Image: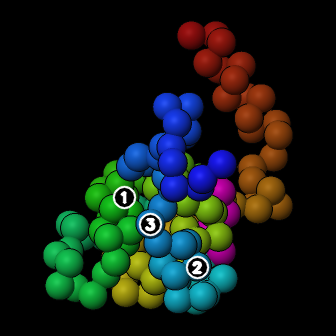
Amino acid sequence: MDPTTHTPDDEVWHDDEAGPVVRPYAMTRGRTAPTRGEFDLISLIVATRSVPSLAAGLQPEHITIMRLAQRPLSVAEVAGHLTLPLGIVRVLLGDLLDKGYILAREPQPTSHMPPERIFKAVINGLRSL
């Protein structure tokens, strides 16, 4: 069969179905870890200012993160909205953290959580309302 001929059954990809035009590692220039921050899946991200212009030296993905982070959201939500691998999103978030464009609130370790009796007291108090 001639590879240049196409039949109606041939699958043709368009737009989003074709996947990203730029490979994820190219977005981070080959970096695999953020320069700052841990960025756990449930870490909360929030922008510290309004969305900067493209002239600020940011990539389109950085700008998208800034738009999303105008309200607090988790790292998992950012990755979901961008449809990018988590490792890539962490590197991009590290870039924004370095420039002071975002704040990241890491989850508290369980050793810093209040005792279980306090949670039970709150639940019992809510039930009595």
Residue, disc 1:
69
Amino acid tagged 2:
Tyr
Where in the figure is residue 120, as x and y percent of width and height? Answer: 77, 29
Residue pictured at 52% horizontal, 36% vertical: 7
Amino acid tagged 3:
Val
Please give the label number shown on residue 21.
Answer: 3
Query: Which quadrant of the rendered structure holds the C terminus?
Result: top right
The region drawn magenta spans 38-42
The question of residue 107 being in magenta is answered with no
In terms of secondary structure, what is the magenta stretch mainly? loop
Residue, disc 2:
25
Q: Choose top left, top right, bottom left or bottom right for residue 3.
A: bottom right
> Compared to 101, does 83 lie above or below?
above
Residue pictured at 37% horizontal, 58% vertical: 69
The residue most toward the top is 128
Q: CA separation, marks 1 and 3?
A: 24 Å
Lower position in the chain sequence, tag 1 or tag 3: 3
Amino acid tagged 1:
Ala
The question of residue 39 being in magenta is answered with yes
Frontmost residue, 5 versus 123:
5
Where in the figure is residue 63, as x and y percent of width and height? Answer: 30, 68
Please give the label number shown on residue 87.
Answer: none
User: On the rendered structure, is 91 left or right of 50?
Assistant: right
Lower position in the chain sequence, tag 2 or tag 1: 2
Question: Dot 1, how many residues are within 10 Å of its Cα: few (below 14), some (14-19), or many (20+)?
Answer: many
Q: Secondary structure at mark 2?
A: helix
Residue pictured at 65% horizontal, 57% vertical: 41
The answer to whether marks 2 and 1 mark residues whose Cβ atoms lie closer than 8 Å is no
